[in-house]
Image (cartoon, rainbow, N blue to C red):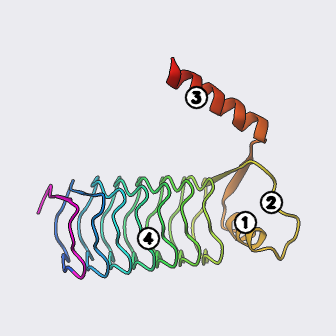
Amino acid sequence: MRGARMRGSLLNGARMRGADMRPGIVRGSNEMQTSDFSETKMDHSDLERAKLDNAKLRYASLQGANLKKAVLPNTDLRGADLSGADLRHVDLSGANLSGADLSATYLYEANLSGSNLTGANLHKSVLTGAMVIRANLTGADLSDAIMLRASDFPPNKKNQTALAYRKYRECGGRSLLVPIPEWERMIAVRQFHDDH
């Protein structure tokens, strides 16, 4: 299945354990709920908007994969290699990412709420706007990970956001406060470059 191109496929419950699908295209409205992709090689594959709810991707290799806007709630990604993957706007709520390699990933506005990141490697990851409420970060490596914010976190230390942020900081994560006028300036410059 190396280099497979699957668009609009219905693979619910499929057993693809150990398959080599590099660099495949599994894009769009593909539905692969409850499928078993454990130990599958999908490095540099395009999985944008793929639906993998409750799927098994244990020890799968997804290095450099495009998973933008993919739907992966309650997915088993234990020990998976997602290093360098594009995880913008991905839904990983309730996912098991224990021992997974998420180093140098781009998790912009990713939903990691309720996920298990025990012992996960998030070294040099970008977590700007990521939702980490009720995520288990025990033993996670967040060294050199960065989270950009437009405002300071709420002073209420019992607030869910404040608790998640404290866990993030305790695991080595860093944050950078960029005031709203600076964001607006950056957006205006980007828009100018796009228009001209």
Residue position for label 1: 165
**In this rendering, the label closer to the viewer, 4 or 3:** 3
Examine the image and state in which quarter residue 141 appears: bottom right
User: Residue drawn 47% across and 62% down?
Assistant: 90
User: Residue drawn 23% across and 62% down?
Assistant: 8
Q: In this view, does 152 lie above or below 195?
A: below
The kind of residue on which mark 3 rests is Arg
Secondary structure type for disc 4: loop
The kind of residue on which mark 4 rests is Ala
Residue position for label 3: 190
- Residue 8 part of the magenta segment: yes
* Magenta residues, dominant SS class: loop
The kind of residue on which mark 1 rests is Tyr
**In this rendering, the label closer to the viewer, 2 or 1:** 2
The kind of residue on which mark 2 rests is Phe
Q: Do the residues labelled 2 and 1 touch (CB within 8 Å)?
A: yes
The one nearer the camera, 143 or 56, is 56
- Residue 9 part of the magenta segment: yes
The one nearer the camera, 55 or 163, is 55
User: Residue drawn 30% across and 58% down?
Assistant: 28
Q: Position of residue 186 (x, y in %)?
A: 66, 31
Q: Residue 100: give its label.
A: 4
Which residues make up the magenta segment? 1-13
Q: Cα distance, mark 4 to mark 1?
A: 21 Å
Q: Is residue 62 above or below residue 17?
A: above
